[in-house]
Image (spheres, rainbow, N blue to C red):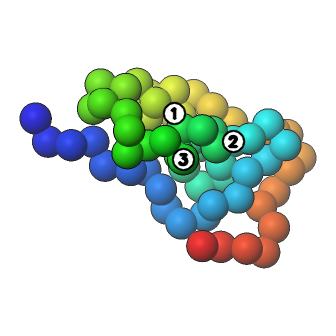
Amino acid sequence: MEEVKSPCIKVCQHDSQGICFGCRRTVDEAGNWSSFSNDEKFEIIQKTRARRNAPGEMPGGFLR
């Protein structure tokens, strides 16, 4: 089975709920990505598809 790749798009800024504006992962999900199994990574990606950033919040000027 091929390894599930990180959904990071180098927009590493989080809203007040801790959701990344770029990939929609939480701080913990992004920080621990390499330690998750493929099944866990797939589950996280499924969750990110339903997530939205906090209403009215936008990323600032920092892009990684």
**Numbered badge on residue 57:** none
Residue type for callout 1: Arg
Query: Which residue is denoted by mark 3 in the rendering?
Result: 31
Label 2 CA crowd tier, 10 Å (few <14, some 14–19, many 20+): many
* Number of numbered labels in the structure image: 3
Whether residue 7 is visible, yes or no, is yes
C-alpha separation, residue under disc 3 versus residue under disc 2: 12 Å
How far across and how far down the image is residue 48, in percent?
53, 34
Q: Quadrant of residue 42?
A: top left
Q: Quadrant of residue 41?
A: top left
Q: Quadrant of the C terminus?
A: bottom right
Q: Residue at position x 27%, y 32% from top?
A: 38
Q: Secondary structure at mark 2?
A: loop
Q: Is 51 situated above or below 63?
A: above
Residue type for callout 3: Gly
Label 3 CA crowd tier, 10 Å (few <14, some 14–19, many 20+): few
Who comes first in sequence, dot 3 or dot 2? 2
How far across and how far down the image is residue 55, in percent?
85, 40
Query: Which residue is denoted by mark 2 in the rendering?
Result: 19
Q: Quadrant of the N terminus?
A: top left
Q: Is residue 45 left or right of residue 59?
A: left
Q: Secondary structure at mark 3?
A: helix
